[in-house]
Image (spheres, rainbow, N blue to C red):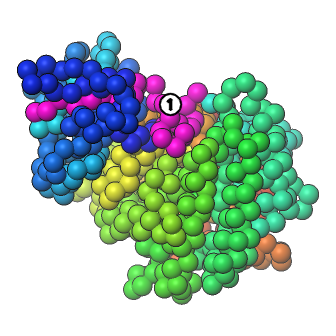
Amino acid sequence: MSRARTALLGALALIATGSGAAAAVPADVEAVAAVPCTVDYKVQNQWDTGFTAAVTVTNNGAAKSSWAVKWSYAGNQKVTSGWNARISQSGTAVTAANESYNGTLGTGGSASFGFNASYSGTNALPTAFTLDGVTCNVDDGGGGGTDPDPSGKVDNPYAGAKVYVNPEWSAKAAAETGGSRISNQPTGVWLDRIAAINGASGSMGLRAHLDAALAQKGSGEEVVQLVVYDLPGRDCAALASNGELGPTEIDKYKTQFIDPIAAILSDSKYAGLRIVTTIEIDSLPNLVTNTGSRATATPACDTMLANGNYVKGVGYALAKLGAIPNVYNYIDAGHHGWLGWDDNFAPSATLFKQAATSEGATVGDVHGFITNTANYSALKENNFTINDTVNGTSVRQSKWVDWNRYVDELSYAQGFRNQLVSVGFDSGIGMLIDTSRNGWGGTARPAGPGATTSVDTYVDGGRYDRRIHMGNWCNQSGAGLGERPKAAPATGIDAYVWMKPPGESDGSSSAIANDEGKGFDRMCDPMYTGNARNGNSLSGALPNAPLSGHWFSAQFQELMKNAYPAL
């Protein structure tokens, strides 16, 4: 998906004349004051039967307490849903009026909204817009989805680009029986400790990866995917991925981790790469779900909520990295089985906004969000929906769904994107979904809905996700590779990615001494009977697993065996 640009003058600058006709004016700085309003209409994603558009209107006239933008289509486009505006349509004419919360539009102020629409044939752009009946100029954004915003960034970094294949991961994958079938796939490079920046234990450092990406790039565009993951008190609810920095070491995080990464990424040598950063997985969601009076709360998460160092660290990373013209920040947004409940969903978006406006960061430093990083939630459950009922009982009441609003990652990512926009993130933000381990294929994959004996037999018999409990996250037995990495696969989605390299362990099955700060989490022990976060269920983990991030051959073979689509 894409990030909407600030409304600027474009090729079609129009002003209203005394006779009511529209006359062209030069698209320069002086013209800004001459036109009463500017409009940026952008097709962010388009497929055979529909599209998603983002619109930003800027008022250059007197301040307004309410507003309405109007335009007409030349074809059969039909708006089907929208956000941040009340959108109506009569024939080809469309009206977008403010919501109750965004009616104020000061002089020089902007408002953004978006919508989904259907069409057939040609999806021609509107050529004229009005704000409260006055003709505006048009910033002709086109429909390709890759035009730059004022910072020089493109809308969707994955569009029209190759994605970096990590040679270290590729070699391990190719060495496995059958692994050559996927060893050419792009995966994330994890910067999970200070030593990883320059290369730990003989592995490639950040510069080495960027140099290798330049070699792969050739004359085309190349995306490099980095996971920035070393917050103070990291992963306060899962010992397997604890980090090297103590809860109070925020200054060390800034000066010894983020600053050196930013210095390398700022090197002009790498200016031709599109660098995607996944910012601090699992951190902010923990502050929502694992603190306070909740049964899932931990003292460590309470500490990180109280000292604010997750929020400060994320804000600092966004500000430093977002200032680099070819860096695209995506914040980790958990997954549907974590934040999809009513009491987690909106508070999480609000917390993300807090982090994105701290330590010098702004929402403009956020290009999007990523869900399901290093997790197993199914991309799309086809055999049941959240609206189904069985014998008068809602699917939401099943033990598996347990009152969640979402049943899969695609619907969650799209829904959460709208929630994020509603709290002030740019209307053009895009989502990434990690599909590296959520395929759930193989012989256990259901071919259709479950029996309608009860709501539980219906859901359990039809769900693709075969975990014992949705809260299980460590080296899951029966998991399979998911959709292969792909750009712009669905509305609101910038890409499906393999941010977690398949075959890298989630955590050790038993305690292993190490110098990486990683502890032993019982959720990685196959014999563990659980806790409040997984409904006191068996962990579902594979046995004999190494430390998190280390190569786990048995898991890699399991993922290939159960891949969906199949290899």
The image shows a total of numbered marks equal to 1
- Label 1, residues with CA under 10 Å away: few <14, some 14-19, many ≥20: many
Rendered view: 161 above or below 431 = above
Residue at the (47%, 75%) spot, across then down: 287
**Does the magenta run of residues contain 156?**
yes
* Residue 86 horizontal/vertical position (percent): 16, 43
**Does the magenta run of residues contain 113?**
no
Residue 456 visible in the current orientation: no
Q: Secondary structure at mark 1?
A: loop
* Residue 41 horizontal/vertical position (percent): 32, 32
Observer-nearest of 75 and 402:
75
Rendered view: 205 above or below 253 = above
Residue at the (48%, 69%) spot, across then down: 358
Quarter occupied by the N terminus: top left
Rendered view: 300 above or below 49 = below
- Location of residue 130 (image quadrant): top left
Query: What stretch of residues is rendered in magenta?
Result: 133-160
Is 304 situated left or right of 73 in this image? Answer: right
Instruction: Name the main secondary structure of what is drawn in magenta.
Output: loop
Is 274 situated left or right of 415 in this image? Answer: right
- Location of residue 217 (image quadrant): top right
> In the displayed image of the protein, which residue is found farthest to the right?
202
* Residue 233 horizontal/vertical position (percent): 63, 78
Residue at the (69%, 58%) spot, across then down: 262
Is 462 situated left or right of 258 in this image? Answer: left
Quarter occupied by the C terminus: top right
